Amino acid sequence: MTALYGVLAWLLLIVACTLAAAIAVGGLTLVHARFRGIDFVQHNEVGGFIIAVVGTLYAVLVAFVVAIVWQQFEGSESRAGVEAADAATVWHAAAGLPEPLGAQTRGAMVGFARTMIDEEWPAMRHGGESPHAEAAITGTIHAIARFRPADAGEANLQAQLLRSVEDLHDARHQRLQDNKTAISGFQWLVLDLGAIIVIGFCYLFGLQNSVVHRIMTGAVACMIASTFVLIFELDFPFRGDLAVSPEPWQTFLRSIGAL
């Protein structure tokens, strides 16, 4: 499954829809050929009531899962922006520190941003992380904590910087956790089972025009497959073709470079 995150989203969508439609239509053709003597048309009325209930329940289930992964994706995207904003806050506030600590803190934030862009974001596409990022943050925390303020103003600045760096540390850990939390295998099993049942019900209907029946069945399978691809792409917000970009960090570097 992880290897599929390296496939372009649009290509994965086309392949998934094509395969799903082909399998569904092939199954429909085999079932109706195998039970040629059964008049499927006479079951349409009763089957229609049942599929309405089953289809509605399945639609609610799929919509719920899509809503959850979509919210998690947007949350991860928002937190990535907040994380870069925390680094910018530290960089600007460090101007009030005496040298060489001020320059060291600013340099640490710039280095951390470059580590995010060059190392951590590429590593997260495979579920990993940068081995240097944690050391950069903890080193900055220790350096600021060891600082001995000369007056109340510097003490307040030290407290503010410690809070900001700790917020940056927590935001990074939350981002890494977002990239490990996924829909469980059992949840995928329930979604797959529901898809099989819904498509299976399409086999129990009868139409005088078999071509129209195949098109309708293929369309249902394609719709379900496209929803699965959407869930798959949003499930890990930093891995797929739709992954959250490191743009906030690039913006941070551009903004301080312009000063």
Image: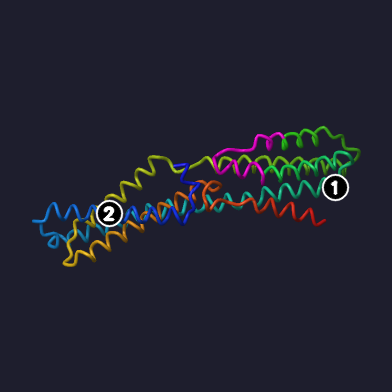
Instruction: Locate the N terminus by quadrant.
Output: top left
Does residue 174 appear to the left or right of 161 in the view shown?
left
SS type, badge 2: helix
The amino acid at mark 1 is: Ala
User: Mark 1 highlights which residue?
Assistant: 95
Q: Is residue 202 above or below residue 152?
A: below
Q: Residues within 10 Å of mark 2 (few under 14, many from 20)?
A: many
Discs 2, 1 touching: Cβ within 8 Å = no
Q: Position of residue 34 (x, y in %)?
A: 14, 51
Instruction: Locate the C terminus by quadrant.
Output: bottom right
Q: Residues within 10 Å of mark 1 (few under 14, many from 20)?
A: some
Q: Which mark is residue 78?
A: none
Q: Is residue 81 above or below residue 131?
A: below
Residue in the image at 36% along x and 58% along y = 223
User: Mark 2 highlights which residue?
Assistant: 24
Residue in the image at 82% along x and 45% along y = 94
SS type, badge 1: helix
Residue in the foreground of this view, choosing between 161 and 181: 181
Does residue 100 appear to the left or right of 46 in the view shown?
right
The amino acid at mark 2 is: Ala
Q: Which residues are magenta?
A: 117-135
